[in-house]
Amino acid sequence: MMDWNDCQRSLGISFRDESLLEQAFVHPSYLNENRNVARPGNERLEFLGDAILNFIVAERLYEEFPELTEGKLTEIRASLVCRDTLAELASSLKLGDWLLLGQGEEANGGRSKPSNLADALEALVGALYLEQGLGEARRFLLSQLKPELERIKAGKMIPNYKALVQELIQGQGRPTPIYRLVETTGPDHSKEFTSEILVEGEALGRGTGMSKKAAESQAARAAWERMRCSHG
C-alpha cells in the first residue's frame, strides 16, 4: 500500500484530495489487471498536464529571454518538454517509486521506463493544476526546471536534437529513426565522421562531427530544422 503522505513530503506538495494525487500514478496496466478498481487511470491527467506544462515553459521562456527569436524559443521549449527531459526529471524526483503498475509492466521494468516516468510527471502537473490552480503547478514545475533554465541563461544548454526529432517522427506515426555512418575522413588522431538519419529508408538529414555521436546529433539537428520548416 502506497503512503501518499510520504509521496507529498518527498515532492514538497500538499493535496487536499489524495485520490487525485493517486490517480496521477495509476498506469493503464494496473487497471487492466485490476478490473474491480473503480478509480480512473492517469491518461486524462497526462493529457491536461502536457498542455499546462507546455504553457508554463513557453510563458517563462517568453519572459526570461526577450532577445530570442520565435524559432529559438520553440527549439528550447521543445527540448525542455521532450520525453527524455521529462523522464530524467521524473527519475530525479523518484516518481517511479509511486507508480501503480500491473504485474506484467512491473516485471518489464515499468518503474524506470522513460515513457511511464514522463507520463507520470505530466499527470502530476495536471493534478496539481486541478486541485490548486495554475500558480501551484507553475511553482512546482519551475522549481524542478530551475537548473535547466540556469543553463539556458548561461548559454550552456545544447538541445537534445536526437530526442526531439525522434518524438516528432513518432508523433507522425512513423518508425524510430536510424543513424548510418556515411563517411570517415582524416588521420587517426583527428577523424571526422559523417552520419545520416533515416526513416523508412528516407534520409532526413546529414551531419559531421569529431565523433560518431556528434555527427548523429548534427544529422538530427538538420532533420529537426527541416521538419519544423515543412510544418510551418
Image (spheres, rainbow, N blue to C red):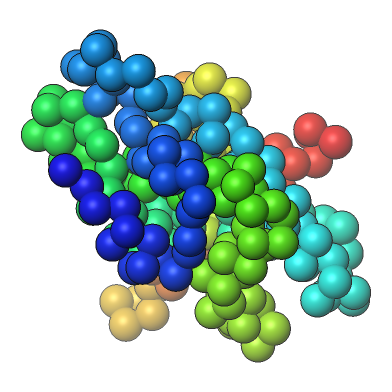
Seen from the viewer's position, the closer of residues 110 and 207 is 110
| Residue 33 visible to the viewer | yes
- Residue drawn at point x = 42 percent, y = 23 percent: 40
- Residue depicted at 25% across the width and 25% down the height: 30
Residue 148 falls in image quadrant: bottom right
Residue 103, position as x, y percentages in the image:
12, 28
Q: Relative to residue 67, is residue 77 depicted above or below?
A: above
**Count of marks overlaid on the render:** 0
Above or below, 102 against 11 in this view is: above
In the figure, is residue 225 to the left or right of 125? right
User: Going by the picture, which residue comes out furthest to the bottom?
Assistant: 154
Q: Is residue 142 above or below residue 80?
A: below
Left or right: residue 135 versus residue 103 is right
| Left or right: 92 in relation to 154 | left
Quadrant in the rendering for residue 31: top left
Instruction: Residue 199: give x, y in percent of width and height.
Output: 49, 29
Query: In the image shown, does 18 or 71 lie closer to the viewer?
Result: 18
Name the residue: 85% across, 36% down.
Answer: 232
Q: Nearer the viewer, residue 103 or 10?
A: 10
Q: Quadrant of the N terminus?
A: top left
Q: Residue 115, position in %: x, y?
A: 38, 40
Residue 176 rendering spot, x and y as whole percentages: 42, 31
Q: Is residue 83 visible?
A: no
Q: Residue at x 44, y 32 (%)?
A: 42
List the single residue furthest toward the front: 16
